[in-house]
Amino acid sequence: MSPARPPSQPANAAPGSVSRRARLQLWLRNFLPSAAHVNGLELARMVVGAMVVLWLTGMASQTWGQHDHSPWLFAAMGASALLLIGTPSSPMAQPWPVIGGSMLSALAGWVAVLVFPDPLLAAAVAVGLAIMVMVVLRCLHPPGAALAMWMAIQGWHDVSVLLNPVALNLVVLVLLATAYNRMTGKRYPAPQHSQKAQAAQPSRASSARIEGSDLDEALERFNGVLDVSRADLEALLQGASQAAFKRTLGNMRCEDVMSHPVHATRPEGSVQDAWALMQQHGVKALPVVDAAQRVVGIITATDLLNHALTATPTALSSKLKHWVLRKKDSGQRVGDLMTAEVSKVGSYDRMVDLIAIFSRAQLHHVPVVNRQGKLVGIISQTDLVREMAAALSLPHEDA
């Protein structure tokens, strides 16, 4: 009998056709524009800012040292103004990429003109050389590539054009954009390095798992243009979360979490003594060890209470108290009630491995042994949860 087809798959559909169609639809969606996280006020700020800084930059270039043979405002300035005003937090819009990247690109275009007489070849070489220089010197600024090509196509042989209008345009533009961004509430130049003071004291909520809706809400509050796609930003955040998890939890060992010194009992010990030991130290389980301190079992308060309930079918409250606390000689030994098949972990094992052990075996306590197999500690579910909460900087209440 052939397996039933999914309801959405036609009878004559080839295997895998639905998944291929779904992949094609997802791929075609990449051609659609992403949602704009910019409100009307921010859009007006961008439009007015670009016009104002370009107009004032052009006026400054017309006033100071204009040459008759050179333009007063080169075309790539429009793209630079968009980055400076529209994406002031972008690494490509900071002062060094804008000024350094553009100047080096213009120099690359000038060199290409001197070496290659053909304007088309010179333009291609100028762009490639500009990209190489900007990447190596960490000043990547896309309008710089346009400036390099403009220099090559125009065939500028006069090196003075690098000072006016190129350098003059760039310096004035950055100064004006800095003032405008700050007046309109944008931080510029934007920090491009980690803030050590903030990293040393992370927010307790910062390590929580980030969902897609959280990212959308943050983007709405950001109210600006990012030069990174939402998908890449989400992937970056997920990667950072995984790295943080590995750093905080992945490297922790059981010996960092376990309770020690650990209280244990022997198989020949009495049940009354085991119960008294639990009550004295406020624990709910005792590893059972042999003469060589090797774990041979575990006995819990639940084991003792279950046995007491079985032995006292009536008047439970009084008889249970008498059986557990006051009976002088029950005849029961720890070895009669303990769980012999006990899960153990090594002190050198990773703490994250405990999650699977606790969930798979439905355990509440796991003894910890050293490399020689001897008991050195014990870990409870409460210990694990407390350490995970502390490592993730999440608020928690003491058990």
Image: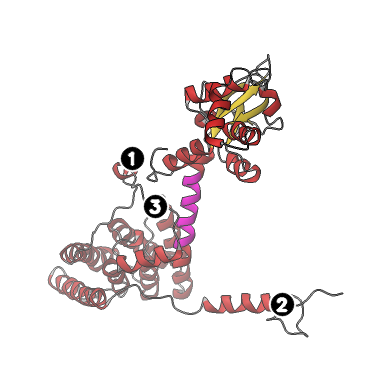
Give the crowd class for mark 2: few <14, some 14-19, many >=20 residues within 10 Å. few
Task: Tell me the kind of residue under disc 2.
Answer: Pro
Going from the N terminus, do you reach mark 3 or mark 1 first? 3
Q: Residues within 10 Å of mark 3 (few under 14, many from 20)?
A: some
Residue 193, given in percent of the width and then of the height, sits at 34, 49
Q: Distance of mark 1 from mark 2, alpha carbons?
A: 52 Å
Whether residue 346 appears in this view of the structure is: no
What are the residue bounds of the magenta stretch?
Answer: 233-245
Q: Which residue is mark 1?
A: 200
In reply to whether residue 202 is colored magenta, the answer given is no
Residue 149, compared with residue 336, is above or below; it is below
Find residue 220 and report its horizontal and vertical position in percent.
Answer: 33, 69
Q: Residue furthest top?
A: 291
- Identify the amino acid type marked 1: Ala
In this picture, is 342 found above or below 93? above
Q: Residue at x 71, y 32 (%)?
A: 341
> Is the Cβ of the residue at disc 2 closer than 8 Å to that at disc 3?
no
Q: Is residue 356 left or right of residue 162?
A: right
Hey, what amino acid is under mark 3? Leu
Report crowding for label 1: few under 14, some 14 to 19, many 20 or more residues within 10 A (C-alpha). Answer: few
Q: Can residue 7 be seen?
A: yes
Q: Which mark is residue 137?
A: 3
Are dots 1 and 2 in contact, CB under 8 Å? no
State the residue lying farthest toward the front: 315
- Residue 286 against residue 161 in the figure, above or below: above
Looking at the image, is mark 2 or mark 3 earlier in the sequence?
2
Badge 2 is on which residue?
6
Any mark on residue 329, and which?
Answer: none
Q: Looking at the picture, how far across and down is residue 46, in whole percent?
A: 25, 74
Looking at the image, the residue that sits furthest to the left is 63
Q: Magenta span: helix, strand or loop, mainly?
A: helix
